[in-house]
């Protein structure tokens, strides 16, 4: 799955024109906007174009008018970071067009996140933009959202394994209020614990919340976040040791926590995960993205791919789509003759 932008400076120098050749991006295939100062660009219709305009508005400098074509095979609304892919691809294109880059890659990721916040109106986190910007072949990226520090984790012996992404093709079933409720629970838990965020909490703080008579759903949400942070740190250690069995077990525990404590799974996602876990050669499976529909990601041996696909097709009542993924580099410029 990729998102590619091809373009060049416009001859008239007044308007930038974008053409989308992908239904995954938007049904409106073409739009134009006035070139000029970054602060003069405003969001509008079509909505998918706001991701691009937001990147232009938040770029490191003013850019000349351009004509470009966008092609994407990343399915939208599936929890696979299609918006971050479009944003980071756009920003990378603007770097090539202008010859200018921010001093640090973190600035690029943050500019893309701001584009999504301010132009698309989506209060997303930073993880998707960071991995799209800073991904490295053969590595996982450990990101600490407290201070935005990163560490590349080499995935030793990854050549023996792959990730199977399974799209449930089930639409998200809950509104943005469900996400907001979980976020608010985390804020409330942090407030009860007198901490800036749950990133500063530890496993003992779960008992503190219970002793303070915090609401059951607040305790559950906090328990997921606190234990997920520890699972992430443990997963980085497992990868550094080449221990994919442990990594897979942590994936399983993560899904179970997302299902039971954070309650963002769905019957479709649980069915996909359950079917995958039954296959010999599967090490772990969990939902990916925000949940409530979308995709699962499964770690398995290469010789188990066909067995896993057939098992999932047999057990799942819907019509899943499958993608094979391995860790590769993030967005980059490709020369076109």
Image: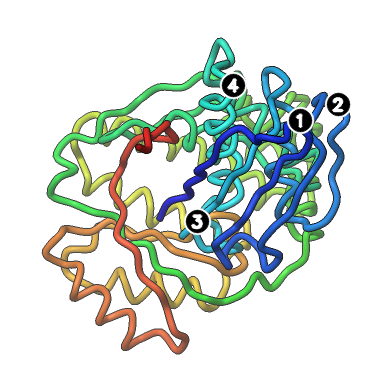
Q: Of circles 4 and 3, which is in front? A: 4
Q: Would residue 300 appear left or right of 16 to someone viewing this image?
A: left
Q: Of circles 2 and 4, which is in front? A: 4
Would you place residue 241 above or below residue 285 in this image? above
Disc 2 crowd rating (10 Å Cα; few below 14, some 14-19, many 20+) is few
Which sits earlier in the primary sequence, circle 4 or circle 1? 1
Q: Would residue 102 appear left or right of 329 to someone viewing this image?
A: right
Residue at position x 13%, y 49% in the image: 160
Q: Is mark 3 on a helix, strand or loop?
A: strand
Residue at position x 34%, y 76% in the image: 275
Q: Which of 147 and 53 is in front in this view?
A: 53
As measured in the structure, the alpha-carbon distance from the residue carrying label 2 to the one carrying label 1 is 6 Å
Count of numbered labels shown in the rendering: 4
> What's the image's color scheme?
rainbow
Residue at position x 41%, y 35% in the image: 330
Q: In which quarter of the image is the N terminus?
A: bottom left
Q: Residue 57 carries which label?
A: 1
Which sits earlier in the primary sequence, circle 2 or circle 4? 2
Tell me if residue 259 can be seen: no
Q: What element carries label 1?
A: helix
Which sits earlier in the primary sequence, circle 2 or circle 1? 2
Q: Is mark 2 on a helix, strand or loop?
A: helix
Which sits earlier in the primary sequence, circle 3 or circle 2? 2
Q: Which mark is residue 39?
A: 2
Q: Are marks 4 and 3 in contact (CB under 8 Å)?
A: no
As measured in the structure, the alpha-carbon distance from the residue carrying label 4 to the one carrying label 1 is 14 Å
Q: Residue 72 carries which label?
A: 3
């Amino acid at each position: 799955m990729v998102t590619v932008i091809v373009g060049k400076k416009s001859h008239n120098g007044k308007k930038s024109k974008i053409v989308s050749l992908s239904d995954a991006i938007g049904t409106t295939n073409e739009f134009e906007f006035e070139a000029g100062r970054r602060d003069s660009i405003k969001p509008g219709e079509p909505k998918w174009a706001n991701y691009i305009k937001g990147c232009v508005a938040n770029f490191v400098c003013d850019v000349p008018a351009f004509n470009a074509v966008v092609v994407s095979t990343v399915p939208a609304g599936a929890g696979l970071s299609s918006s971050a892919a479009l944003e980071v691809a756009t920003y990378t294109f603007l770097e090539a067009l202008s010859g200018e880059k921010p001093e640090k890659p973190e600035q690029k990721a943050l500019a893309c996140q701001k584009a999504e916040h301010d132009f698309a109106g989506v209060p997303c986190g930073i993880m998707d933009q960071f991995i799209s910007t800073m991904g490295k072949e053969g590595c996982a990226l450990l990101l600490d959202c407290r201070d935005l520090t990163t560490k590349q984790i080499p995935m030793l012996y990854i050549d023996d394994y792959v990730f199977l992404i399974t799209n449930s093709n089930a639409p998200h079933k809950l509104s943005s209020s469900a996400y907001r409720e979980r976020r608010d629970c985390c804020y409330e838990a942090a407030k009860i614990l007198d901490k800036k965020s749950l990133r500063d909490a530890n496993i003992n703080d779960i008992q503190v919340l219970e002793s303070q008579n915090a609401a059951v759903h607040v305790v559950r949400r906090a328990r997921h976040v606190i234990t997920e942070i520890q699972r992430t740190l443990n997963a980085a250690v497992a990868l550094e040791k080449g221990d994919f069995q442990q990594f897979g077990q942590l994936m399983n525990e993560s899904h179970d926590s997302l299902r039971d404590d954070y309650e963002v799974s769905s019957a479709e996602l649980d069915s996909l995960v359950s079917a995958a876990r039954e296959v010999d050669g599967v090490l772990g499976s969990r939902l990916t993205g925000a949940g409530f529909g979308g995709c699962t990601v499964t770690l398995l041996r290469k010789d188990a791919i066909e067995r896993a696909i057939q098992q999932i097709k047999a057990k799942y009542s819907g019509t899943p789509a499958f993608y094979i993924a391995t860790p590769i580099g993030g967005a980059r410029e490709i020369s076109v003759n």
